[in-house]
Image (cartoon, rainbow, N blue to C red):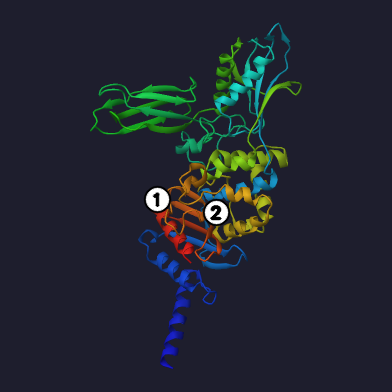
Amino acid sequence: MKLRVKFFVLLFFTVISAAILGIHVNAMNGHENMVQQLNQLIQNDPDLKGAIAGISIRSAGSGKIIYDHKGDIRLRPASNMKLFTAAAALNVLGEKYTFTTEVLTDAQVKKNTLKGNLFLKGKGDPTLLKTDFDKMALEIKELGIKRIKGNLVGDDSHYDDVRYSLDQPWSDETTYYGAQISALTASPTTDYDSGSIRVKVRPGIKSGDKVDVEVTPKTNYVKIVNHAVTVKEDGKKEITIEREHAKNTITIEGTLPVNAKAVNEWIGVWDPTRYAITLFKQSLANQGIALSGKITTGTAPDTAKVLGSHQSMPLSELLVPFMKLSNNVHAEILIKEMGKVMKGEGSWEKGLDVLETETAKFGVNTKTMVIRDGSGISHVNLIPANQLTLLLFAVQKEKWFPAYLNSLPVAGVQNKMVGGSLRNRMKNSSTVGKVKAKTGTISTVSTLSGYVTTRSGQPLIFSIMLNNLLDESTGKKIEDRLVTILASQ
């Protein structure tokens, strides 16, 4: 009898404690051990002292919440915002949707000369590479054009001319993840970091030499000022690569030891439209096509005819670099494209209206959310963890869900376009290949939301949102420990 009384007293205080902590405990649902482990970690981890943890766990089969810690508290989602953007884009645009880039003119060709302007019109393709400009230039050459007696005009009028989202920090201006948004842009590599270039710095042959600098794609659109030098093998490796505000002058400072590994940095360029049209000019020149006019920006007239074009990969494939590598520019381009398609205006205002409308179709309560962009770079975005898991539950029934799931990073898988931002995390046997989730990081914030298959074979949906951290990098370890607990059930 005394033992029974002690048991009920203990149970009473456990439930009361959980209620005070904001934890929703389902003591009779077979997850008691999991709940206890999660509670213990959240209560005792020193890095969560003074921070806020919003955690929501659902059954992937029934959608029932089986664990809730502050799940209705609005928190900053960081790049978990992209889970909403990807779902809305698939719903609005469809898996097979592609972006078109066109070469046009309103002039006549006489004796191998185009007697007027040539327009390069971008319609949002975030994956254009230098090789794509080369192919379009070849199309112009094959028309017999050897000279352009006019200007080369970059047309980005498909979207508005607002380059940065509302809350983007000024300090992100020169970063690849804070690059300007334009309907006409270019990427340096097949990671498709739109609106940026890659700067690779290698040591010279001997101490005292200037470091070697390589820019991808090769272009004179940026000016390199190289002050960095090579030092002895035991010297200090300290390289800074910075672009000046509102200019395309990149200064390299510091030291790099002999035989040291190369330093790579991706830099967002100033004015991606001119960047793209400059690359196209290089491609035309490589095909022997001379330009007598200048590079400029403007709008192709409605009467212009198409001389050549390029189609992007379909959205289902684009989602892979977008989500695996957490590409902010892709997110904001998708927002503007949804606005263009649904409301006739490629702007954040119209695109975010579409995002909210589409999100509500999944049963998510958008009235309890603040949405300011598509990427999650804003510190003003606010999403409750329970609404995020509700989205992840609802999208499972959509015909495009396999493409959505395929876009998520997979824990512990080294292939960059499979493991993505989780390729070096959760490598233990209980989690590797069994966790598919979107990461998120901004200052003081770390998030992780997605799907996990437990040891017993039960699929779970989870969202972990850690805010007000002193060091956001500590959140990754906490997330990994929490998900490992789920996976081991």
Do callouts 2 and 1 mark residues in contact (Cβ within 8 Å)?
Answer: no
> In the rendered image, which quarter is residue 279 located in?
top right
Q: Residue furthest top?
A: 111
Q: Earlier in the sequence, mark 2 or mark 1?
A: 2
Q: Which residue is mark 2?
A: 382
Q: Which residue is mark 1?
A: 473
Residue drawn at 63 percent across, 22 percent down:
136
- Secondary structure type for disc 2: loop
Q: Is any part of residue 428 visible from this angle?
A: yes
**Quadrant containing the N terminus in the rendered view:** bottom left
> Residue 481 at what x, y percent from top left?
42, 60
Of 351 and 308, which appears nearest the observer?
Answer: 308
What amino acid does circle 1 point to?
A: Ser
When the figure is inspected, residue 9 is found, relative to residue 138, above or below; the finding is below
Give the number of the mark in front: 2 or 1.
1
What amino acid does circle 2 point to?
A: Leu
Callout 1 crowding tier (Cα within 10 Å): few <14, some 14–19, many ≥20: some
